[in-house]
Amino acid sequence: MRRGRSRPPGAAPAALLLPLLLLLPLTACDRPAPAPAEHAAAAGDPAQDADRGRRTPSVVDHVRTDDPVVFLTYDDSAERDPAFAGLVRERRLPVTLFLTDTVAGPAYGDLARLRPFGASLQNHTLDHRSLRGLPYAGQRAEICGQQTKLRSRFGVRAHLFRPPHGTYDTTTLRAAADCGITALVLWRATLDADGALTYTRGEPRLHPGDIIAVDPDHPTAANLTARTERLLDTIEEQGLRVGTLENYL
């Protein structure tokens, strides 16, 4: 009978070595290289980082909260009533003012003086154009342009936006996101010209988290300050108070 050739002492058959090699951990040189897109993102590629960080703004007319607060919001021209500014200062009202540059621009100095008393200055476009249906470039110019104005005049990086007339489309959301907006702010209740509240949906009474819109420029509106004071009485009677919208959105 023929004998096979003898192995050196301590040598293992190749069939036994292969499973052992497979169990050893890979070194950095052994691991497969990442795909080009993965490599760019890992290296901090700006385009990758921008797409990853951008979020579509939420659209809100009400904030989910158990806190007994509602939120007072005003569009352009609230500053035209000198007594209104006095009311904000006296009561330290945390109102949110959505500003259009072509309307509120001349009064920017007066508005700046309200900020220490609780007023928040947010975006309402450059020219108050209805945005729905406009191309992306036009919508972005309106929103980002007012972002630049607010930043240069007040040092404010606005993150809330009210579209003119409350109208918007998916292009508005994309443009707003690209301009640094995190929320489009609509309203569940409106203060009418005669000082009465009307509601866009739901039960006709205020609830915690409701956003209230006051139109300072209504052609038949009663005195803005008087309407606001009556509204504050209504809010208090319902066991609520005015909250700071920026703290909730």
Image (cartoon, rainbow, N blue to C red):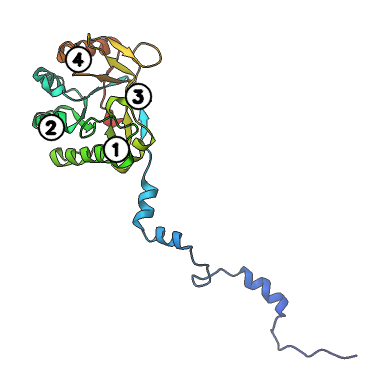
Q: Circles 3 and 4: CB distance less than 8 Å?
A: no
What's the residue at 14%, 38% (across, down)?
154
Q: Quadrant of residue 163?
A: top left
Q: Which mark is first along the chain, 4 or 3?
A: 3
Element type where label 4 sits in the image: helix
Q: Circles 3 and 2: CB distance less than 8 Å?
A: no
Amino acid type assigned to the residue bearing label 1 in the image: Gln
Q: Circles 4 and 2: CB distance less than 8 Å?
A: no
Residue position marked by numbered label 3 in the rendering: 61
What's the residue at 19%, 11% (across, down)?
220
Q: Which mark is first along the chain, 1 or 2?
A: 2
Q: Position of residue 191 (x, y in %)?
A: 26, 14
Q: Quadrant of residue 130?
A: top left
Q: Residues within 10 Å of mark 1 (few under 14, many from 20)?
A: many
Residue position marked by numbered label 1 in the rendering: 139
* The C terminus sits in image quarter: top left
Q: Which mark is first along the chain, 4 or 1?
A: 1
Q: Position of residue 3 (x, y in %)?
A: 85, 90
Task: Tell me the distance, in whole angstroms, between the alpha carbons under discs 2 and 1.
Answer: 20 Å
Q: Which mark is residue 228?
A: 4
Amino acid type assigned to the residue bearing label 4 in the image: Thr
Number of marks in picture: 4
**Which mark is in front, 1 or 3?**
1
Amino acid type assigned to the residue bearing label 2 in the image: Gly
Task: Tell me the distance, in whole angstroms, between the alpha carbons under discs 4 and 2.
Answer: 23 Å
Amino acid type assigned to the residue bearing label 3 in the image: Asp
Task: Tell me the distance, in whole angstroms, between the alpha carbons under discs 3 and 2.
Answer: 26 Å
Task: Tell me the distance, in whole angstroms, between the alpha carbons under discs 1 and 3.
Answer: 21 Å
Q: Which mark is first along the chain, 3 or 1?
A: 3
Task: Tell me the distance, in whole angstroms, between the alpha carbons under discs 1 and 4.
Answer: 32 Å
Q: Which mark is residue 105?
A: 2
